[in-house]
Image (cartoon, helix red, strand yellow):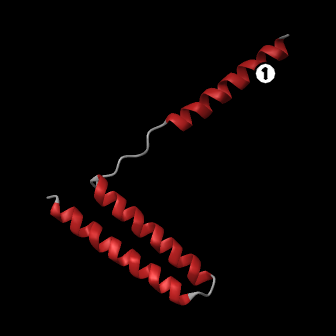
Amino acid sequence: MNKLKMLGVTALAATSIGVGVLAAPEPASALPPKCELLAQKARIARAAGNVFWGLGQKQLASYYYGQAAAYREQAIDCNYADD
């Protein structure tokens, strides 16, 4: 019976930790929401460019690198526009 109780307590603790991790809020950013969205799009476009570069598709990689640069510039301009 003690082993069963210990197993139940362990399962309850593991479940509590799992739910706590899922319910944790995302870290806050110093950028306003619009600027953060632009920065996130820049990171995604850069990652897509890296994938295509790794696959040898240099034209597609160049396209996505250009998109990333444009999003970064918009995020920088957005940050200064809110001052």
Left or right: 2 as drawn, with respect to 37 = right
Residue 15 is left or right of residue 50, and the answer is right
- The x and y percentages for residue 52 are 57, 80
Q: Is the residue 66 above or below the residue 18 in the image?
A: below
Horizontal and vertical percent position of residue 12: 68, 22
> Which amino acid is tagged 1?
Leu
Question: Which of these two is toward me, 28 or 59?
Answer: 59
Indicate the position of residue 56 as horizontal and vertical percent values: 62, 87
- Residue at (46%, 74%) from the top-left corner? 46
Quadrant of the image containing the C terminus: bottom left
Q: Where does the image place residue 80, in percent across and percent down from the top left? A: 18, 64
The image quarter containing residue 3 is top right
Residue displayed at 65% across by 28% down: 15
Image quarter of residue 65: bottom left
Q: Between 17 and 62, which is closer to the camera in this rendering?
A: 62
Which residue is painted at 66% across and 25% down in the image? Answer: 13
| Picture residue at 34% right of the left edge, 71% below the top | 71
* Front position in the image: 4 or 41: 41
Instruction: Tell me the residue that label 1 is attached to.
Output: 7
Above or below — where is 12 with respect to 76? above
Secondary element under disc 1, as helix, strand or loop, is: helix
Vertical side of 69 occupied by 26: above or below: above
Say few, some or many: other residues with alpha carbon within 10 Å of mark 1 (under 14 / 14 to 19 / 20 or more). few
Q: Quadrant of the N terminus?
A: top right
